[in-house]
Image (tube, rainbow, N blue to C red):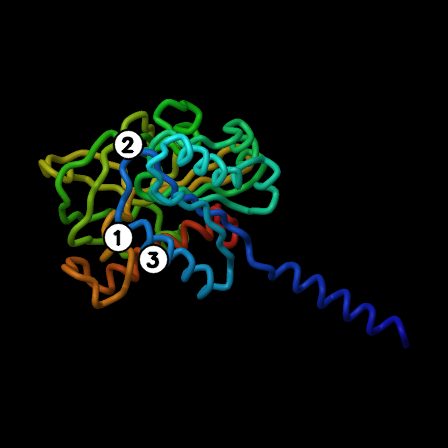
Amino acid sequence: MKIIPILILAAVSASTLAAAPKKLLVVTTTSGFRHSSIPTLEKVITQLGQNSGEFSVDYVRQPASNPDAAAWQQALKDELQKLSPESLKNYDGVVFASTTGDLPIPDPQGLVDWIKAGHAFIGIHSASDTFHKWPEYNQILGGEFAGHGPQVGVECLNQDPQNPANAHLDKSWTIAMEEVYEFKNYDPGQVRELLILDKHPQSKEPGHFAVSWCKPFGKGKIFYTSLGHREDLIDTDPNLKDRKNSIETSKAYQQHLLGGIEWALELKKVAP
């Protein structure tokens, strides 16, 4: 008679462990251009985790301004200690959300090895404008920022409707206004493309232009979306000033981002 409650307790404990939310470390530090939409990205990523119940979020944030450049640089290094191999043991995935420049992370190879061991790496917008002097970072991400023109409207073509990042989208997805990146060191044969353009965002000449993709890296999974410059694409707040994108477009973007995170964390899989 005493064994049954123990078995039940064990089953409940196992179920609780299986349902425990994943842990994401979101990095929003920059040593180059800093996007004004970073606080909006932070807010929305937190909301996506809370609303889905699938992941919790911790942050690596920009230190406060300091006229003493050396002191500020040291504060940045201290904040980035959360990316040390010892600290990364506490997380299932890392998000680079509009990071830029060469960040003084404590152990670059340690981050590479951690991803290869079976963890998630998610890059948003200018994550591709980060670590231009570190070739292996581009191997992780799959493409490197080359430039952009004025903000424009685009029609993104859905290349993988089975992926959670795209499952909610039709064959094409029109965005009224966004900053659209061009890439170098990008090979479509080395990634699984999610969204592309078949016209150059500025000249409208026919071609093949990447917007979002995913890929394996060792045992880890990489999801990258170049979308995420404008607050009114990221956030569904109807009171945002000078809104150009509809609330429905913002909802679609959030689902694109959430689905990519879910895929990278292996919370949702794509049938082979």
Residue type, numbered disc 1: Lys
Per the model, the C-alpha gap separating discs 2 and 1 is: 26 Å
Q: Which x, y percent locates residue 149?
A: 14, 37
Residue 194, percent from left and from top? 33, 44
Which residue position holds label 1? Answer: 171
Q: Quadrant of residue 226?
A: top left
Q: Amino acid at mark 2?
A: Phe
Residue found at x 44% / y 47%? 26
Residue 157 screen position, x and y as percent: 24, 47
Labelled disc at residue 254 = 3
Foreground pick, 130 / 262: 130
Q: Name the residue carrying label 2.
A: 145
Tag 2 near tag 3, CB within 8 Å: no
**Mark 3 or mark 1: which comes first in sequence?**
1
Of the pair 99 and 162, the residue shown nearer to us: 99
Compared across the picture, whether 40 is left or right of 54 comes to left
* Crowd around label 3: few <14 · some 14–19 · many ≥20 (10 Å): many
Task: Between label 2 and label 1, give the one nearer the viewer.
Answer: 2
Closer to us: 267 or 103: 103
Q: Which residue lies at the image location 49% right of the left edge and 34% below the top edge?
A: 217
Q: Give SS at disc 2.
A: strand
